[in-house]
Image: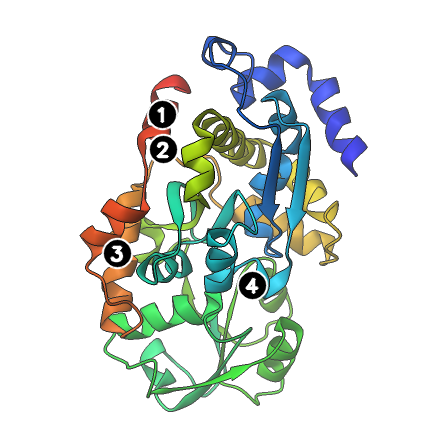
Amino acid sequence: MRERRREFLRIFGVAGAAAIAGIGSKWAHAEPPPETTRIRFAKVPSICVAPQYVAEDLLRAEGFTDISYVGSGMEAGGVRGAQMMSEGGSDIGMNFAAPLVIGLDRGAGISLLGGVHVGCFELFGSARVGSIKDLKGKTVSVLAKESAQQVFLASIATSIGLDPNRDIDWVYQPAAEGKQLLAEGKIDAYLGFPPDPQELREKRIGRMLLNSAIDRPWSQYFCCMVAANREWVRKHPIAAKRALRAILKGSELCASDPELGVRAYLAQGYTPNPEHARQALRELPYGHWRDYNPEETVRFYALRLREAGMVKSPPQKLISQGTDWRVLDQLKRELKT
């Protein structure tokens, strides 16, 4: 699979790939090399993070030679993923916005550097649930406590006046079990990240209650963001910029050639239905990292999660202590289309 990705860049032509990837520009050549050639990403199973897998060849062009993926599943995503990064378990990578906000509130030593895309999760309900308000007193399946699924759904519930701690009966189980129980009518709702929604829609399991790529206000804020270990960024500012550039350009490659993103994802050893994966990559709004405001994303989820009792700090404190948009602002100027 890795050879197929390399073949794409070779066939496309060095000049053409560099134009899309932003590599080979005067900006990249004018910069000093990265302070370190080693970089570690958290290995998140959702196909939403395909841009960081597509970015592997771009990272090599940026000067990284030792690229690895650490952790798996719950360890790498959600609130645990933010904590793992804070403790030095990974250097940089994509994670979901709402869990990152909780991590910052708990003092995680991470910096949010930018947003990648909006709209990847979808909420499905059983025949007993006609709207999100109907979740009161109902059973909802999520991967684990403080998983990205639970944190996002808690923010949704709070926005319509539900108390996620008292009004929802949470059950924790693997995605395959949650989808099966929804099909059997044994749970009332399931929030899925791609390619789960594509599978549920094809099999006509449940009814879609919310699509974050379409429904406001969720469609106006980033779902996946890039975060990095704060000390790593302090020691390696050039490496951080080069890594962020590669991920953002990976997003643009996913937008222009979804099949490339699918191959990069499958090369990590994940085994979804390939057609569901292709559909997910075609539907996700990649390539729009300039069009939304990452700071407003942090503020939005900080407010929702404060209402849910999951965050104590005011939004501005989290923004001032846990975000750094300087490199993003530079890249917006340098990578104009």
Residue 229 in view (yes/no): yes
Which mark sits nearer the N-terminus, 3 or 2? Answer: 2
State the CA–CA distance, disc 4 to disc 2.
26 Å
The quarter in which the C terminus is drawn is top left
Relative height, residue 332 to residue 136 (above, below): above
Residue that appears at 62% across and 11% down: 15
| Front one among 311 and 335 | 311
Residue that appears at 33% across and 36% down: 291
The residue that mark 3 highlights is 300
State the CA–CA distance, disc 1 to disc 4.
32 Å
The residue that mark 1 highlights is 332
Q: Amino acid at mark 2?
A: Arg
State the CA–CA distance, disc 4 to disc 3.
24 Å
Q: Which mark is residue 197?
A: 4
Assign a secondary structure to mark 3.
helix
State the CA–CA distance, disc 1 to disc 2.
7 Å
Assign a secondary structure to mark 2.
loop
Which mark sits nearer the N-terminus, 4 or 3? Answer: 4
